[in-house]
């Protein structure tokens, strides 16, 4: 509890100092996440090729590797060749890393991730209890590097930093669509850069079983289409994550979402087989048979095997969306429920989970499950991951369960970074008691896999996850949207330098769609488009695992800069329509650019079927832009719009909102505000 | 010999038919490389989701996998979900693949790569003797897919195709800079797409030993900076290549270029150690000691180990640039030379190579070496790879040696695709006898590693290598530059869809350099820039292995479309300066775009040191564009330029040619032509 209260105090200080830092002409703060406490002064530490690092107290292989990565990144960023030698016998170095010890052998919730970073005009020092804390500090150090026309420097700052929440996760669903090892590694690089610390690996789904079992080889042999992680690869990922201070929590979703298990092992199911890999999405009736000892024997063997690969103290057993249909249809299971006084499917699932819990305990694992596992029959050390939202999580905390908030962080909703950012796992306004508050461990970003492939995934995860990472790490009061977007833009470029393709994917996809390098007009078009939400797309396109993900919707990215830029300019302009020349000029330039590009856009949209889907958007764009120009004119001149204009224009905007093309314009709410502001 | 004569005949036919195909409005030929023989007719095979494949005669795992890759690519391209089931019991399918057998267990020079492809209005058929031939046909099939506004189709064509040369290679130097496994795999994907068939893997250099030896672990343990391929990874690459009909020829460069060997095993050298990994580039004095039995014992052990990993019948022993300095300085070696009547360093190297040859023969390998290995002391089954050029290769053929041409295909020269394309390994004009001609096995593209990293490598290799691949595969007379560039533009997009980053790298690098997503102006700037040649950069920058490769020169790509486009428009315009409105308008638009972008370009160049290097180019661009506009005006109006204008302008162009900024403008020769054409 002291953690949260302290954060509140730090917050005010931090915001104050942040403003001061902004006013400091030599220091542009693009830190993301913001540290808990930062003070800056006028001085600077000059950058030079003699930059050196020492680890005078403790160092180990993990710290050494993190330092080498940092040196490489700084060298790439500055073009300055740096010595890669790190001295362990000297305290004199440009950057002294003073660490007390390695940290936990198996990183837990209680790993100390705090650090301090002190930069003066003569040198820098990171102090941390653990190597994990030092690695967090190294990320901050890199983010502090300042560029000016003639060189680089580091600003004089003092940072005391510690995370607000202990569980700061990102889940990737590799079940519905497989993601190669390289994609996972790049994701872990990105996570480390923004101080996320849990990679929740959703490894099994109706649509695919993605982790090799040597005990039960038909799981991947028949249930994966050949797309799975070998045990060696999984260990490689675990090691890669640990090297970056990231825990790996694997999820084996049971008793539902298990159809892929049944292809090779139909006896696990509650109805006779044969089974095939599910291709459709949505809730599946097939579920494990919780009444048979053989089911638990299988699970025990499998979990025992997985426990050898995944050292984390937690294991996620899913538990969501098991609809009980197979259970109801099976007389033997019905009879079992009567015999054991299990009233309904929920009770049977609780019975299943009790057995599962024993298996996990046998293998020294704590259980994590989705909302549905919450049941009085389960002990209080089960962690609830809430996909139902804050209310559900709060209710669980009131019952004494630890929980992780996820629902506001579903990336496939294609919401803005701002919307995710403002959702707090534990808002100040929460009615939880101090003890109950301590049960909220943190949050997890969820990247569900229905509409993902290895090419598009980065653009779905980044940079929005960086904004959410700040929500999980920084004090609650760090919540200025404009400032977040300013820093996010800088972080987005830094993330790309790690090898992520969230920015380059769009152009590559547009070139492939258009069959040419000449995509200037399409680039303009795509810059004001974003994918519709998962559910809008699913309803429109009736997607399955077999749907090719090569459409315009797969090319464009959620919440591109245009959305917030137009919104910010609109709000600025509307504050003084007759006076604000700059915002008006910027908006005008944008609207005119769209009009100019429209003929070329529409010619390309008409050239090939996969682009032709968006032809209606192509014809709407210049109409909407024209409406925007008209609104600007009426507003800046203070004149009324002609009769019928507003109604016609709002109808045009409404029509542009339909999700049929699978892509939507980013600027419609802002345009609507402009139009509504026109007197009539 | 019949091969070449036949190709000559086919050529005329092919060109004629190609012209006919171009005239056919329903078929845009973007095949690259052009097949040996193609006839097309008016019909078309419609595309639909019922597209199916059968392999009624032979099929194996390799063919099955190639078919799955093809189906996936077609599905991605068309957005049409396809059945992945391939029938083996039916001849009825949209595409019937009729193969006689697997091909060689270990692919050799004599593998039959020929195929025929017949597409009618009702179906398609690939016929081939081997699976490798069928895979070549599948690539052609994919390239034939036509897009129109309402759908896709395949044109009715008959293709009989066979390669002109048997050895069509690409060498990558992973010694001077290491390239990750994923980069190699993507490269192999690209090679398969354009029908290259030899991956020459340069694995050892003064600057790094890149392949694990279990017998001699200090080779990588001390000589690689930890950057090397494990034996498992090397086997994975060999298998990946074989799955695509590509041989892997490893190179272990000896007796020079071996400094990295000596770090762990100094006794191999001709002078006492200790040695460190070389960081500088250029010729190194350190060389193996050819006088000691222990040297050959070591090599025998090492080659024996490598022979287990690399099944190809050929092994490359380098042999280049051994300067003999260490040999001359060592009295014991001098004495040995006198005793053995070895006149000079070349004779001693021949002595060394004779021993090496015996070791290779013991392990059932043929020897390949660079020019320097050519010596009467060596038997005629040694293959000479020529870095000295066509003359050297021709001389070798006259002496009865087989050879591979490389010198005109050095990608680090940063030449245009056209220049590489026009260099023929065996021009019609060659004075070789028919028997000597048969000794020219083909050619190899060389990608040397001094200035490469994993981010830039794709843009250095592609798409230029695709043009060279056509030179190696297609009849000699397929040599229309404009048509090559037209097809290359299409192939470049197809290559990107395989996961290569040759197109997306530039923008990503520009964003990183500028620290922002707002790179519209820089993109315009970069579109008319290319890297200076290896030697120009090396001389200007004094690069070493430790030089960060993060400069503007590393962002821009060789021979971007602007070069040939401006050249083509210039030539078109100059044919009728007063009459050609279109070429003039296009050139004017380009020049004006550069002028408009210039202020934003120069503002960004001034903002950060790594871009500031190119500030002189930024100020030259609008001046050159203005000169271009002036030239267009004088020429279209038929007026003389004012006194001094031409001299001033040519001086401006000359100044813009200096290589100091490491990047050069692509359009200077064309601009020079325009200016020189102005009457004065």
Image (cartoon, coloured by chain):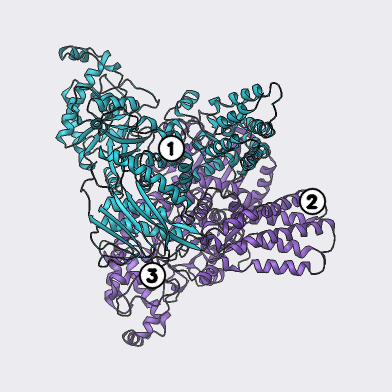
Chain colours: A cyan, B purple
Give me the C-alpha separation between circle 1 and circle 2. Answer: 48 Å
* The image quarter in which residue B296 lies: bottom left
Q: Residue B543 location, x and y as percent? A: 47, 69
- Indicate the quadrant containing the C terminus of chain B: top left, top right, bottom left or bottom right: bottom right
Circle 3 — which element? loop
Which quadrant of the rendered structure holds the N terminus of chain B?
bottom right
| Chain of the residue under label 3 | B
Q: Position of residue B154 (x, y in %)?
A: 58, 36
Say which residue appears at 41% left-offset and 48% top-offset. A17
Marks 1 and 3 sit apart, C-alpha to C-alpha, by 41 Å
Q: Is residue B145 visible?
A: no
Q: Report the side of B624 relative to A573 (left or right).
A: right
Say which chain tag 1 marks.
A
* Residue in the picture at 49% in, 63% down: A151
Q: Which mark is residue B190?
A: none
* Rendered position, A278 above or below A138: above
Residue in front for this viewpoint, A176 or B131: A176
Residue B35 spot, x, y in % from top left: 58, 48
Report the residue marked by disc 2: B580
Q: Marks 1 and 3: same chain?
A: no
Residue A453's label in the rendered image is 1
Q: Tell which of B533 and A28 is nearer to you.
A: A28
Which mark, by number, is residue B206?
Answer: 3
């Amino acid at each position: 509890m002291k953690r949260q209260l302290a954060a509140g105090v730090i917050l005010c200080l931090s915001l104050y100092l942040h403003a001061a830092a902004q006013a400091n002409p030599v220091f542009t703060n693009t830190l993301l996440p913001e540290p808990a406490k930062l003070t800056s002064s006028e001085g600077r530490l000059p950058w030079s090729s003699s930059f050196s690092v020492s680890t005078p107290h403790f160092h180990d292989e993990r710290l050494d590797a993190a330092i080498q990565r940092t040196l490489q990144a700084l060298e790439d960023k500055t073009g300055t060749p740096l010595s890669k030698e790190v001295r362990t016998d000297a305290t004199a170095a440009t950057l002294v890393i003073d660490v007390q010890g390695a940290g936990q052998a198996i990183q837990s919730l209680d790993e100390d991730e705090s650090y301090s970073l002190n930069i003066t005009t003569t040198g820098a020092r990171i102090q941390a209890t653990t190597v994990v804390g030092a690695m967090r500090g190294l990320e901050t150090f890199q983010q502090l590097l300042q560029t000016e026309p003639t060189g680089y420097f580091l600003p004089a700052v003092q940072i005391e930093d510690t995370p607000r929440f202990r569980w700061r996760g990102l889940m990737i669903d590799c079940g519905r669509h497989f993601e190669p090892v390289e994609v996972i590694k790049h994701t872990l690089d990105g996570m480390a850069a923004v101080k996320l610390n849990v990679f929740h690996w959703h490894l099994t789904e109706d649509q695919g079983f993605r982790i090799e079992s040597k005990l039960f080889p038909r799981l991947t042999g028949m249930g994966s289409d050949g797309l799975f992680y070998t045990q060696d690869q999984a260990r490689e990922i675990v090691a890669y994550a640990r090297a970056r201070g990231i825990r790996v929590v694997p999820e084996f979703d049971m008793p539902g979402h298990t159809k892929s298990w049944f292809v090779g092992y139909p006896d696990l199911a509650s109805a006779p087989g044969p089974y095939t890999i599910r291709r459709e999405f949505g809730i599946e009736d097939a579920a494990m048979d919780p009444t048979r000892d053989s089911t638990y024997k299988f699970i025990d063997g499998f979990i025992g095997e997985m426990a050898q690969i995944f050292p984390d103290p937690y294991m996620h057993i899913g538990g969501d969306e098991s609809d009980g249909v197979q259970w109801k249809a099976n007389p033997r299971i019905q009879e079992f429920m009567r015999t054991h006084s299990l009233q309904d499917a929920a009770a049977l699932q609780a019975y299943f989970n009790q057995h599962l819990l024993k298996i996990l305990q046998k293998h020294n694992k704590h259980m994590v499950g989705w909302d549905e596992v919450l049941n009085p029959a389960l002990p209080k050390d089960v962690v609830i991951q809430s996909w139902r939202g804050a209310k559900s999580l709060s209710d669980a905390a009131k019952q004494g369960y630890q929980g992780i908030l996820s629902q506001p962080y579903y990336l496939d909703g294609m919401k803005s970074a701002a919307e995710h950012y403002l959702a707090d796992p534990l808002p100040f306004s929460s009615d939880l008691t101090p003890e109950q508050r301590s049960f909220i461990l943190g949050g997890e970003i969820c990247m569900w896999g229905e509409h993902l492939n290895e090419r598009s995934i980065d653009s779905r995860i980044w940079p929005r996850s960086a904004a959410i990472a700040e929500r999980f790490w920084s004090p609650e009061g760090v919540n200025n949207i404009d400032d977040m977007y300013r820093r996010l833009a800088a972080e987005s470029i830094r993330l790309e330098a790690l090898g992520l393709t969230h920015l380059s994917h769009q152009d590559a996809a547009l070139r492939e769609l258009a069959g040419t390098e000449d995509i200037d007009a399409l680039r303009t078009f795509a810059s004001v488009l974003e994918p519709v939400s998962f559910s809008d797309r699913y309803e429109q396109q009736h997607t399955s695992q077999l749907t090719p993900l090569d459409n315009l919707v797969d090319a464009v990215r959620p919440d591109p800069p245009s959305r917030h830029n137009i919104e910010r300019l609109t709000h600025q302009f509307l504050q003084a329509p007759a006076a604000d020349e700059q915002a008006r000029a910027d908006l005008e330039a944008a609207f005119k650019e769209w009009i100019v590009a429209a003929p070329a856009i529409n010619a390309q949209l008409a050239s090939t079927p996969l682009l032709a889907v968006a032809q209606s958007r192509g014809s709407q764009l210049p109409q909407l832009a024209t409406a925007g120009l008209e609104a600007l004119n009426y507003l800046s001149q203070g004149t009324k719009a002609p009769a019928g204009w507003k109604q016609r224009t709002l109808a045009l905007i409404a029509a542009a909102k339909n999700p049929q093309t699978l892509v939507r314009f980013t600027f419609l709410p802002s345009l609507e505000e402009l139009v509504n502001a026109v007197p009539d």
